[in-house]
Image: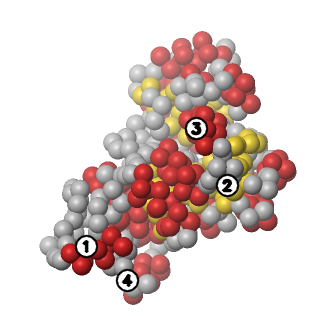
Amino acid sequence: MSDYDDLEAQWGFETQAVRAGQQRTHEQEHSEPIFPTSSFVYATAAEAAGRFSGELPGNIYSRFTNPTVRTFEQRLARMEGAECCVATASGMSAILATCLGILKTGDHIVSSRSIFGTTTVLFTNFMAKLGIETTFVDLSDLNAWEKAIQKNTRLLFLETPSNPLTELVDVKALAEISKKYDCLLAVDNCLSTPALQQPIKLGADIVIHSATKYIDGQGRCMGGAVCGTQEVVGTDVYAFLRSAGPTMSAFNAWVFLKGLETLSLRMKAHSAGALEIARWLEQQPQVARVYYPGLESHPQHELAKSQQSGFGGLLSFELKGGKDAGWKLIDATQICSITANLGDTKTTITHPATTTHGRLTDEQRKESNIADGLIRVAVGLEDIEDLKKDLARGM
């Protein structure tokens, strides 16, 4: 570790978000440079051999070594309190790289039911083809987690808060269970980001991100990341990336670096706006229930206060009247963007049962409490009164 690494470790979160990982070139640029190159050249054949064998440090091929991507990895790792980070082409490829980097045929996953619908499909349709079985449990039920662990369980996987119902689990308590049974605990931290929650400091082994969401912050690029120890992420997950190639582009990494610089400010604004919208929705007679951990009515409000520094920008609410009422409200909006993405400066709205969780069976949606009248809103940075009026049009 260099003296500069020691200095970075002493910086506050916002300083790390702006400056960590940057190494200026001989041009002495202020902003981080983009290296849009597929390969790198060597002074001699011996140097090339040393790079490929790992005996010499340095760039080899942009599938797995690129200076811009490396800067993003180092910065995000620092912000998450992790030893290292591996960047990938998307959030789903980050989950795939984690699974295939550390699991083998015959291994077992215990996963929360309250996860992104596509992640459920990945586990049930594709991991199962490789002989890796998954047992799904209620996110907040610690007893269910422990009972589901088998002798071959290798990975515990969850989102907290979950998408779209904002359910939580006590990460510290679950980390103790994972260590008791020698399992790895992986937390998808997409909704909170390290600006609001740092799962590794709570005992998690692996943190996964869809950088496409709040890390970008403006809906421009696809990307993912896996943060953790050098042994697990820096060796096993990196080995999968090097061979299989779900690679983050240099340009996307540069965009994400710019996103990290404003992440803390944006997450505070998203959280403040979402809380105001959630409180307003609770007062509307057409709304049966609002899901947002910042509300005192949320069953895990106190847990959210203890392990998060903010409540995030995503909320869901259930309308009386089911799917017809939900679609009517969505179609009546004029400001909210009807899209399944989230984490944008622009507020987005979607009907989970027919979009993000549309590929699940009716039984799976029922088990995950994805009701036909459920609406998900990722509150952006527009004027809050304008958003209230926009949502009211459909009520």
Mark 1 or mark 2, earlier in chain = 1
The crowding category of the residue bearing disc 4, from other C-alpha atoms within 10 Å (few below 14, some 14 to 19, many at least 20), is few
The circle on residue 4 is 4
Q: Is residue 124 above or below residue 213?
A: above
The crowding category of the residue bearing disc 3, from other C-alpha atoms within 10 Å (few below 14, some 14 to 19, many at least 20), is some
Depth-wise, is mark 4 or mark 1 nearer the camera? 1
Amino acid on which disc 4 is placed: Tyr
3D distance between C-alphas at marks 2 and 4: 34 Å
The circle on residue 48 is 1
Mark 3 or mark 4, earlier in chain = 4
Depth-wise, is mark 3 or mark 4 nearer the camera? 3
Q: Nearer the viewer, residue 84 or 255?
A: 84
Which secondary structure, mark 3?
helix
Q: Nearer the viewer, residue 205 or 56?
A: 56
Depth-wise, is mark 2 or mark 3 nearer the camera? 3
Mark 4 or mark 1, earlier in chain = 4
**Are the two marked residues, 1 and 2, in contact with CB atoms closer than 8 angstroms?**
no
The residue carrying mark 3 is: 126
Q: Residue furthest bottom?
A: 3
Q: Nearer the viewer, residue 189 or 110?
A: 110
Quadrant housing the C terminus: top right
Which secondary structure, mark 4?
helix
